[in-house]
Amino acid sequence: MIRVLLADDQTLVRAGFRSILSDEDDIEVVAEAANGAAAVAAAREHRPDVVLMDFRMPELDGLEATARIAGDDRLDGVRVIILTTFDLDDYVYGALRAGASGFLVKDTEPAELIHAVRVVARGDALIAPSVTRRLIAEFAGRVKPPEPGPRLNALTEREREVMTLVAGGLSNDEIAARLVLSPATAKTHVSRIMTKLGVRDRAQLVVIAYEAGMITPGWLTS
């Protein structure tokens, strides 16, 4: 059972998401929060698998709430999906840097919402990789990248190759096909990369790859 926390200051939005998710046999909404501070408290109390986090909330916004959840060792298994209007939220890139596992636009289709929750709960891939890629490409240019850290030196040549494909939004199966590997081998490479870099999930690999200059926005279009 996938346990979900809904964090949004609009009651009707929460009710709509609860209705959609509660119809699924493998998803349970365990708590709701109307602001960021309440979301952090609820995450600590209920330890959900996934938090659907509105970006713009009173008291504590979604960015800071996400950073607090991602930075709490007790919540290591909690994944955050940012809910955004896309055109207005210039801080989504910052949310990915803060530890979010991906994002969804608020007018997403019910099937996409359900799929997103399941994917992030598995820690398997980014939400909507093509859209995430465009978003990061847009905002990466606005952020001054830090110098690549020495931890990247721990990666093998093959692991660097795999990491660039992860950053391009490719799934494990797609990486396997491109590099002529088995899907299991591709998954093992991704897991080792995350362990070596000390990151929570694939979203963080995307951010690190852009900031370290391993790839540039728009390099992978196929």
Image (cartoon, rainbow, N blue to C red):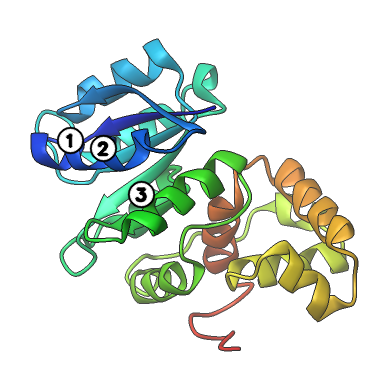
Residue at the spot 15% in from the left edge and 45% down from the top edge? 56
Q: Quadrant of the C terminus?
A: bottom right
For the residues carrying marks 2 and 1, which lies nearer the camera in this image? Answer: 2
Separation of disc 2 and disc 1 at Cα?
A: 6 Å
Task: In this rendered view, identify the residue nearer to me: 153 or 222.
Answer: 222
153 vs 38, left or right, is right
Instruction: Answer above or below: position of 97 versus 59.
Output: below
Tell me where residue 151 appears, x and y as whole percent.
Answer: 72, 49
Separation of disc 3 and disc 1 at Cα?
A: 24 Å
Q: Earlier in the sequence, mark 3 or mark 1?
A: 1
Can the viewer see residue 221 in this picture? Answer: yes
Q: Kindly state the secondary structure of the residue where label 2 is placed.
A: helix
Q: Earlier in the sequence, mark 3 or mark 2?
A: 2
Instruction: Answer above or below: position of 160 versus 19.
Output: below
Tell me where residue 118 appears, x and y as whole percent.
Answer: 52, 45
Whether residues under marks 2 and 1 lie with C-beta atoms below 8 angstroms apart, the answer is: yes
Which residue is under mark 2?
19
Task: In this rendered view, identify the residue nearer to me: 140 or 4.
Answer: 4
Mark sitting on residue 15: 1
Quarter occupied by residue 42: top left
Quarter occupied by residue 164: bottom right
Which residue is under mark 3?
95
Tell me where residue 9 appears, x and y as whole percent.
Answer: 11, 35
